[in-house]
Image (cartoon, grey):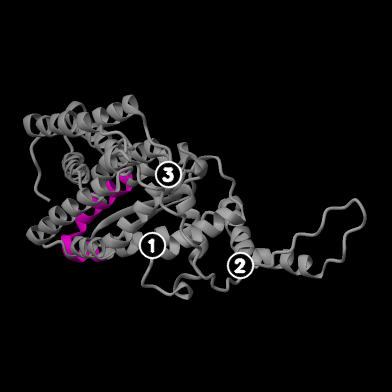
Amino acid sequence: MPPDDPPPASPAPPPAPLPTPAPAPTITPPPNLAPALVAASTASSPAPGEDPPLILSSPDDILLAAIIARGEAPPKAANNIPLLATLFLFLALGGLNWGWKSVLFIGLAIALHELGHVFAMRLSGYKNVRMLFIPLFGGLATGEPRELDATKNALVALAGPLFGLITAALAGALAFYFAPAPWLVQFAWVSLVLNGFNLIPFVPLDGGQIANETLFSRYPLLELIFRLLAIVGLGWLAWKGQMWILGAVVVFMAFTTPTAYRRARLVRDARRDLSWQTRPLDREAVSLLRAMVARQFPDVAPTKYERALPDHVHGLWLSIRKRFPGPGVTLALLAGYAATCLIFAPALAWFLVRFLERPTL
């Protein structure tokens, strides 16, 4: 792997100046901060020996308080209504398009695949882990990491297809050793195809996420090239397979690529300043991060992303302090991914073809 920072040519160019903070938009404090702001603004002068009251007077103060409140917020209460609603739509629309028998096998394979991601997220300490179905397309597992760690991200991405292939292998083994039930064989084939597709190394598929987290995400130019290759590859697959929802994903990726590249370069430049790894999240840091957000969206007025500004700033803060695997862990992750793609999945396909009759859905 190439080094993170190649040695500069001699003589070394002067260091780039820190970005100048952009004009700060007026930020409406979150509801959970309103009592603190009122109390701070109406507090009387402190008594001798007491600390002065906290007065959040500047936009950076309010933004900092919103980010801290976001990071320290307890997990949200479980809400299964979105899961059940998307599952109903997935089954209804899928049944009308693919047939009611097929959609049950596809839905079960997707659910087990996404459960693999969910289990890995919970083991990695993610907050607010959720699972949803995407009608006529697939599923989605989301969560909020407490910190960004490329190793954990890669393991979470690998957990979905790996768990899906394991369940497919168990179904095939049950059909072979105990009861040659056609539905077990049908599920094994559907799960094999679905999880094999997700192992293709194109972002945002799981295989692409694994490769990007282990190899490319720390180098903006390589990440851009990898993203463009994924756009071309997935675009071809969407065209040949007439998968129009996948085509919409490709269009969205192409549209957001310039912004993603600008963000990656800003994060890379900030990582080169080692002080960011020990800098506290204070007013000065928030001011610099706000300026980076303005540079990420140079053609957008700050008022347009005012409501999402805490999320953008917090995301940059986590990305700058993101941890990456060393050479040994990188090789281990790639070896696990390669073994899943080149050994486990082909061996399962050989077993199903050799010992079990391929059903017609």
The residues tagged by marks 1 and 2 sit, at their Cα atoms, a distance apart of: 19 Å
- Residue 118 is labelled as none
Camera-nearest residue between 330 and 129: 330
- Residue 296 is labelled as 1
* Label 2 sits on residue: 59
Specify the quadrant that holds the N terminus.
Answer: top left
Camera-nearest residue between 107 and 310: 310
The residues tagged by marks 3 and 1 sit, at their Cα atoms, a distance apart of: 16 Å
Does 100 lie within the magenta span? Answer: yes
- Pick out the residue farthest to the right: 48
Q: Secondary structure at mark 2?
A: helix
Q: Earlier in the sequence, mark 3 or mark 1?
A: 3
> What are the residue bounds of the magenta stretch?
93-113
- Residue 271 is labelled as 3
Amino acid on which disc 2 is placed: Pro
Left or right of 143 on screen, residue 134:
left
